Image (cartoon, rainbow, N blue to C red):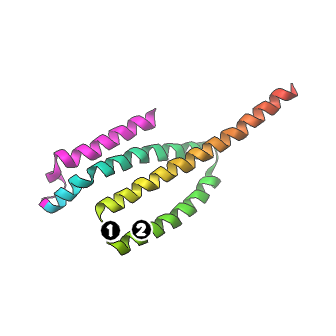
Amino acid sequence: GGALALGLIDAALATAGPVLFPGAFTADALVAAEIRKTAPIVGACLFVHALSVSLEGVLFATNDAKSVAKLYIGNALAMGLAFSWARARGPTLSTVWGGFFLYNIVRCAQFSARLAWNQRDRGARRRRKRDVF
């Protein structure tokens, strides 16, 4: 629940700030318009980011850092390729923030799958203990 609440607060502030107060970030009208345009994807990214780092923290807290490290390697390579592709196409703020959004969606899926896998193992151990007694 806490990750959802934090994510919603992050998303609301990230979206509302640039929309309501574009001059707080820049005096340039073109830059302000681009910031205002990308505010929704920035908000979505921060919402999902709060979820992904919470799931990541659970993996660390349950001593699964080795699996997280393996995911980091694959994710770093994938993001490097994705941003090289984006750079070659002429990146926009929307493309970059959209990439971060997808990155965090993938991380949520990876971390959720790993947590589910770990729980599967835990459930099997519990069943074996019950069968002994």
Are dots 2 and 1 in contact, CB under 8 Å? yes
Vertical placement of residue 24 versus 84, above or below: above
How far apart marks 2 and 1 lie (CA) works out to 9 Å
| Point 40% across, 53% down: residue | 101
Q: Which residues are magenta?
A: 1-29
Residue 28, visible in the rendered structure: no
Residue 80 in the image, given as x and y percentages of width and height: 47, 68
Give the class, few, some or many, for how many residues have Cα within 10 Å of label 2's Cα (few <14, many ≥20).
some
Residue 36 in the image, given as x and y percentages of width and height: 21, 52
Based on the picture, tell me whether residue 100 belongs to the magenta stretch: no
The residue at the far right in this view is 132
Amino acid identity at mark 2: Phe
Q: Quadrant of the C terminus?
A: top right
| Point 38% across, 69% down: residue | 86
**What is the number of callouts on the image?**
2
Please give the residue where the numbered disc 2 appears in the rendered image.
Answer: 83
Residue 90 in which image quadrant: bottom left
